[in-house]
Amino acid sequence: MTYAGAFDKGDHIDTGIGGARKINLDAKQGDGVFSEIPVIDLTDAASPSLEARKKVAQEIYDACVNVGFFYIKNHGVPDEVIKTVKNEAKRFFHDLSEDDKMELDISKNTEFYGYAPIKAKLSDGQVKKRMFESINFGYEPLMDPGASGTVDNGPSFWPAEEKLPNFKENVGKYYSSVMSLSRQLLHLFALGLDLEETFFDQFCKRPGVLLKLNHYPAAVPDSADNAGIAAHSDLESFTILLQDDVKSLEVLSKDGTWISADPIPGTFVVNIGDAMSMWTNDLFLSTIHRAYNKEGKVRYSVPFFFGADYDAVMETLPSCVDEARPLKYKPITAGAHVRMRLNMTYPKQKEEAQPEGIKT
Ligand SMILES: O=C(O)CCC(=O)C(=O)O
Ligand SMILES: [Fe+2]
C-alpha cells in the first residue's frame, strides 16, 4: 500500500510515533471525516468578556472533535518574531557544517533533544530513510513567560554561541511567544470542555515541550517513503506549527482522503496530539498527517509540541466518558507516555516500549 494512493477497507496505516491506526472507509462526517480545516480567529481569546472567550473556545472544541486540526489567525505572535525564527532555521541548517551539526547529535542526548540528520543511523545499525533534517529543543523555563520555576527537563543541545551568534536568543523570542500562546490555548481547550478555564494549568508547570526546526531538501518525491515526514500522529497534547509558503502538509480524514493543509499567510496550524486525545477519551482527535513534498521545493517548518508536566497524571476527564464512549485508557503520567512513544520512534531502549500497556 502506498500512502499516496487510495486505502482499502480495513487497511492499517503505520503512523510511526503514534502506532498503527485502522482506516475506516465507512466513517461518516462527524466521525473524523472532514473535507476542510477550519480557520479560527483568536482576536477574542483574551477578551475581558467570558462570553466572547467561550465563543472562540466553542469553535476550537468543534474543530478538535471533528477534525483534530485548525488554523489560527490573529494569534498575537508578532510578524517580526516569525520572520526571525524562519531565518534562524535557515542559518542553522546551512551555516553550520555537517560536523558542527553532528556535535548536537540526538542519539547522544538522553532526552531525545538534538540534531537528526537526513538519513538517521539507528543504534542497531539500520539506516532509516528520513527525508528531512531537524533539531529540537526541550523545555526552557527562561523562555517561558508563565514559568513556575527555573528547572528544565534535561539539557538541550544548543549550538555554541561562537558558531552561530545570537541563534539561541533569536529562537528564544519565538519560543517565548508560542509558550504564551500555548497557555492561552490550554484555557480555550478547558473552556470548550466545560471545565474551569485554568483547569489544565495545574498540569503544566514544567511542561514537556519541544521546539523543532525542520528542513526538507528540494526533492521531487518518487515514493511516499522519501516524501518528507511519513504519516504519523503527534504524541504530545497539541502542536502549533509554523509553515513557510511551500505546500506540503496533508491531513488524513478518517475516510482515507488526504486533505491539504496548505500554508495560509499569517496563520499557524494547530493540531491535537495523542496525549490530549487520550485525556479526552478520544473525543479530541489526534489526526494523522504527513509532510508530502509534492512541489519538490526546499521547505522549512517549525512545530512546537506542547505536553503536560512529565510527572502529571493524565486521567481521562470524567465528562468525556459515558455509555456511548466507555473509558478507554488507564491513567498514565505524561512522562511515561512520551517515553513510550519516543522509544517507538528511536528504538534504542526498545525493551521499555509497551504500547498496549496503557489501554484499559
Ligand atoms: O513540517 C510539517 O508541516 C509537519 C511536521 C510534523 O508533522 C512533525 O514534525 O510532527
Ligand atoms: Fe506531526
Image (tube, rainbow, N blue to C red):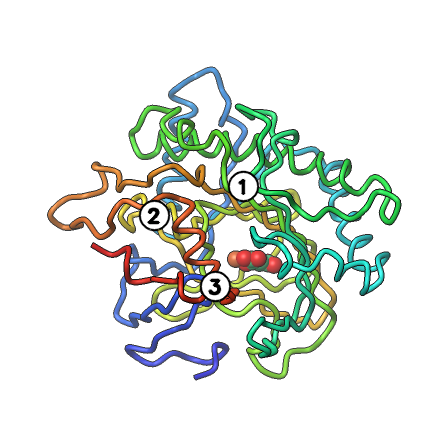
Cβ atoms under marks 1 and 3 closer than 8 Å? no
- x, y percent for residue 322: 14, 44
Which image quarter has ligand 1?
bottom right
State how far apart marks 2 and 3 are (Cα): 30 Å
Label 1 within 8 A of ligand 1 by Cβ: no
Q: Which residue is mark 1?
A: 72
Q: Which residue is mark 3?
A: 349
Which type of secondary structure does the marked residue at label 2 adopt?
loop
As displayed, is residue 167 above or below residue 31?
above
Q: Earlier in the sequence, mark 2 or mark 3?
A: 2
As displayed, is residue 263 above or below residue 119?
above
Please give left or right for residue 299 compared with residue 231 in the image: right
Q: Earlier in the sequence, mark 1 or mark 3?
A: 1
State how far apart marks 2 and 1 are (Cα): 17 Å
- Give 64 or 88, whichever is nearer the viewer: 88
Disc 2: CA contacts within 10 A as few (<14), some (14-19) or many (>=20): many
Q: Mark 2 or 1, which is nearer the eye?
A: 2
Instruction: Kindly identify the amino acid type of the residue bearing the numbered disc 2.
Output: Phe
> Which labelled disc corresponds to residue 284?
2
Disc 1: CA contacts within 10 A as few (<14), some (14-19) or many (>=20): many
Please give left or right for residue 75 compared with residue 52 in the image: right
The residue drawn where x is 43% and y is 17% is: 49
Instruction: Kindly identify the amino acid type of the residue bearing the numbered disc 1.
Output: Ile
